[in-house]
Image: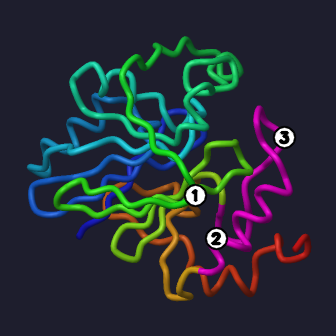
Amino acid sequence: MSIYRLSGRFLEESTYIVSKGEACLVIDPGADAEKILSFCEEKGICIQAVLLTHAHVDHTYGAAELSKLGYPIYLHDSEAELLNGRGNLALAFGVSLEKILKYRTFEGERRTIDLDPFIVEVIHTPGHTAGSVCYLIEGDLFSGDTLFADSYGRTDLPSGDEQDLICSIANELFELPPETFVYAGHSQHAEGEGEAQPDTTIGEERITNPILELI
């Protein structure tokens, strides 16, 4: 499995492209759809699905165009209302965001989805938003805006909740194996594109993350 990173157009947020053979998943298309499609064409890989960790515009900007082209969009059911509403922060960034009319949702705290050849474990991690999720793929965690290297997601935006975030990180993410690599939604490697480097590990964050002061 290979993991690539593209920079989005707002806050250098990370769009991750996870490939295996000729198939790939796009996680958080904050980058333009054209940029994502060009990269996939260059690598000779085909998009199986688009996975959203949450519905803020800096992580979903390219999703509407990808949806129109027929690629399935996935997000947590609790995030669906935010996706096309004012809480997606498009107005705050001064952009007009086209509505995503076709998407697929999942419910519950944990579930596994089969997106052949990928098996994706979805972990519901409310806090940054009510429907924030992290994706665990072959031992690599894509944490969106829930967990960063030596930091964690803000909770003062629509549907955010500090206690939910604390519980999500302490009870869900910190229970993962310590060797789990974490690829964050805003990477400390923001200056680079191409092959992605992990930001941290779960084991490291169990020791150094400042959220430990709140637990």
Give the secondary structure at mark 1.
Answer: loop
Query: Tags 1 and 2 in contact by the CB under 8 Å rule?
Result: yes
Give the residue at mark 1. Answer: 109
Q: Position of residue 163 (x, y in %)?
A: 85, 57
Q: What residue do we see at 82% from left, 70% from top? A: 211
Quadrant of the image containing the C terminus? bottom right
Q: Categorize mark 1 by other alpha carbons within 10 Å: few (<14), some (14-19), many (20+).
A: few
Amino acid at pointer 1: Glu
Q: Horizontally, is 135 left or right of 146 in the view?
A: left
* Closer to the camera in the image, 185 or 71: 71
Q: Categorize mark 3 by other alpha carbons within 10 Å: few (<14), some (14-19), many (20+).
A: few
User: From mark 3 to mark 1, how far is it between C-alphas?
Assistant: 22 Å
| Mark number, residue 27 | none
Q: What residue do we see at 38% from left, 29% from top? A: 103
Choose mark 2 or mark 3, whichever is in front.
2
Is 165 part of what is drawn in magenta? yes
Magenta stretch bounds: 147-175
Give the residue at mark 3. Answer: 156
Q: Where is residue 82 in the image (x, y as percent from the top left)?
A: 62, 27
Amino acid at pointer 2: Glu
Q: Categorize mark 2 by other alpha carbons within 10 Å: few (<14), some (14-19), many (20+).
A: some
Give the residue at mark 2. Answer: 172
Give the secondary structure at mark 2.
Answer: helix
User: From mark 1 to mark 2, how far is it between C-alphas?
Assistant: 9 Å
Q: In which quarter of the image is residue 209?
A: bottom right
Q: What residue do we see at 49% from left, 65% from top? A: 183
User: From mark 2 to mark 3, how far is it between C-alphas?
Assistant: 21 Å
Task: Decide: is 72 above or below 136.
Answer: above
